[in-house]
Image: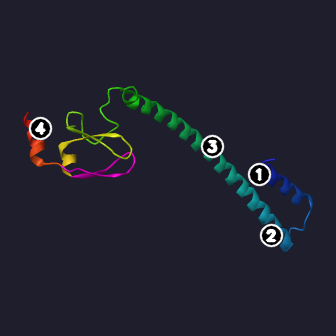
Amino acid sequence: MELAEKAAYIKGLVDGLELDPADKQTKVIKALVSLVNEMAEAIGELEQSYDDVCDQIDALDEDLAGVEDLLFEDYEDDDDSVCDYCLADSESDMAYEVTCPTCGSTIGLSDDKLGLGEMTCPNCGQSLEFDYDEDELDGEDEE
């Protein structure tokens, strides 16, 4: 039995008691029955709204899955990827590859990122420091 049905059943029981309408206790009981009816209606409306929201979330989740498939299908099938984690803005900016000594992942870096001198491995969180000579970097670009 649902809440609305239970509330209607209780109202029927109270009506069947044939209580004196002038009695203070009857007024309290009828007010409580009225309150229970209103609460049952409000809860029913909330349950319906909840079901509607769940349906909308499911539809959004399906739509998002489709968008993710479209956006990331190139990356899933790309066997020619240069590195596991690229911190360069684009492949043309990627001038260096660094391998994390802890987890072994390869990280692509631009001159700007390498120039910072340190970073955290995006895979394992290990702190990586770069020790290089600025002239060596300039000499590589001129070749």
Secondary structure category for the residue under label 2: helix
> Is the Cβ of the residue at disc 3 closer than 8 Å to that at disc 4?
no
Nearer the observer: mark 4 or 1; the answer is 4
**Region of the chain picked out in magenta, as a range:** 117-131
From the image, tell me which residue sits under label 4.
140
Secondary structure category for the residue under label 1: helix
CA gap between label 2 and label 3 equals: 35 Å
Q: Identify residue type, mark 1.
A: Leu
Residue 135 in the image: above or below residue 26? above
Secondary structure category for the residue under label 4: helix
Q: Nearer the viewer, residue 18 or 38?
A: 38
User: Residue 82 falls in which quadrant of the image?
Assistant: top left
Q: Identify residue type, mark 4.
A: Glu
- How packed mark 2 is, by other alpha carbons closer than 10 Å (few <14, some 14-19, many 20 or more), is few
Left or right: 104 as drawn, with respect to 54: left
Q: Position of residue 77 (x, y in %)?
A: 39, 25
Q: Position of residue 24 (x, y in %)?
A: 84, 74
- How packed mark 3 is, by other alpha carbons closer than 10 Å (few <14, some 14-19, many 20 or more), is few
